[in-house]
Amino acid sequence: MYKSEKLLPYFLFFPGIALILFFTIVPVTYGFYLSLHSGGKFVGLHNYFVLLFADSRFRVNAMNTLLYLSVVILTIPPSYLIAHFLWRQFRGSNFILRAILFAPFSMASIATATMFRLMVNPLFGLIPNLLEMFNITLNFYQDASLAMLLAVIHSVWRSIPFMTMYLLVGLEQIPRDVIDASRLDGASGLKFIRYITLPLTLPFLMLSVLMIFVWTINDFEAIYGLFRGGPGYGTEVLAIRLSKETFMYANFGLGAAIGFMIAAMSIAAMLFWIKIQRRTE
Amino acid sequence: MRSRAIINTIIMAILLLWTLGPILYCLKLSLSPHYLMVLDFSQFSIQHYIEILNNPDLMHSAIITFEYTFITLLILTPLSLFMGFALAKFKFRGQGLGFLCFALTFIAPIAILVPLLTYFKTMGLLNTLYAPILGCVAFFLPYGMWMMKNVIATIPVELEEAALVDGCSRLTAFLRITLPLAIRGILSVVAFLFIMTWNNYVFHFAFISDPSLSVLTKTLMSLAFGGSHGEMFYELEAALSIIMIIPAMIMFLVYLKYTEAALTYR
């Protein structure tokens, strides 16, 4: 083999790697550096202290983010059941059915957020109209907790297809004879899930949970598309606050500090993910 | 067994309703002349879709979106293809960086928005489409690379070796032999990257303020929160979001069709 051929993979691989690192690790470090500054002056950890101890709005943001994270938990049971249902009923694959059920995965969060927002419009929306039949009047546009509920439902609606797809991959890797043997031993229904499929798909479940966790704390588009963080600070999660600090108040130090907090949580999840992924391979 | 079938049908119906409900409602709204309180099929009209086609701003926005997606894919596809090729068919130092970079997709653009803003300001790319293009290339490259690796790894190396014996170089052997064989998997990766690029909003929100460069996601958002006099365009919004998801859904069909070889996370 010629010498140039030996160098080939390096030429193919490293320019792209440099680009990726330049846009991930470097900005995280640089973002930390920026978060130590305020108005161009070095202020140490001041921005973090302000956020954590002197900013009541930040507490609301953190609380909202925690509430929004309930998406992760709420996605698991339905995805698990749907994956099971599809796996048992449609062994092999039913292309059209999958295409329809997984479609939300492919839609822009801005577009689906618009759909959900229109669906609860107080003037003509489907949900207020349905509730009116039971003499319940709810205004999703003004009630902060209802807006948050809608954000969570929207996000669950978007996450279920992803987790279902992921779990199906896991389920389809279970060897046929394992299933037959468990059937012979009398495992059925919930017992079958509890003792056979759950343990065997646990890595897939954990990996997808970690991914949805990270997407949820980093979620800007879906929440911004619904009510732009409103009403009031009702759905203002960390990511929305970050964008407002950066673009509305030009408070780059605070923006960078919030960003670094989110990045740190994401990296923690990433390390877990790497550990599990390594073990499954 | 009969009751089993009925239960299955009911579950299926609920699933489809849950998944398609919001979309169907939006479709209905986009076809109504004015927001109708009741479902009235006799009054359906496509006037809002025609309105979109006749609106120069909206059409311009659609064209911009296609352009931006096309250019991004034009850079992203060969880059991820070659990186995937290197990862799948070579052993070399620093290969482990591939997996690490794939894991780095956990760092989302929003968390590093401020440093990225400084980057693009320094490069003088703010308010040009190059900022979102570069952003999309950098952030979707790990997905592209990893999925391409999985696709290419399914093609047996013996075929390439036969071409090497016949005097091809590694690169030509790859381009002539492996590439045509892997084309379906590659298509599915490209479809996936198309969806991600087409749907992106964050980069456009953050780095572009010029309304003549606004892509469909951004145009939809400006419609959603009212015109300059506070007027609302509910039906137009609904119609635009339906139009927006169509290209992504077509690409999703391509992705699903050819994905067996390219399962995203393996």
Image (cartoon, coloured by chain):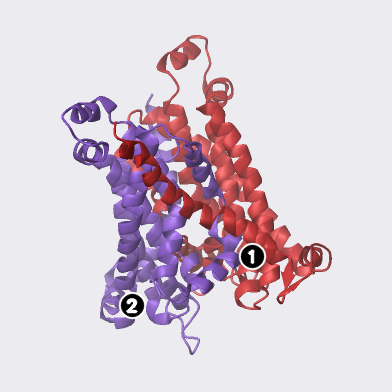
Chain colours: A red, B purple
Q: Which mark is residue A37?
A: none
* Disc 2 chain ID: B
Q: Badge 2: few (under 14), some or many (20 or more) residues near its Cα, within 10 Å? A: some
Q: Residue A90's x, y, as percent?
A: 35, 31
Give the quadrant of residue A218.
bottom right
SS at mark 1? loop
Q: Nearer the viewer, mark 1 or mark 2?
A: 2
Q: Badge 1: few (under 14), some or many (20 or more) residues near its Cα, within 10 Å? A: many
SS at mark 2? helix
The residue that appears at 26% across and 76% down in the rendered structure is B53
Seen in the picture, residue A121 relative to B7 is either above or below; the reply is below
Seen in the picture, residue B7 relative to B252 is either above or below; the reply is above
Q: Circle 2 is placed at which residue position?
A: B58
Seen in the picture, residue A76 relative to A40 is either above or below; the reply is above
Q: Which mark is residue A235?
A: 1
Q: CA distance from mark 1 to mark 2?
A: 29 Å
The residue that appears at 20% across and 40% down in the rendered structure is B180
Q: Residue A196's x, y, as percent?
A: 54, 20
The residue that appears at 69% across and 56% down in the rendered structure is A261
Quadrant of the drawing holding the C terminus of chain B: top left
Query: At label 2, which amino acid type do we have?
Result: Leu
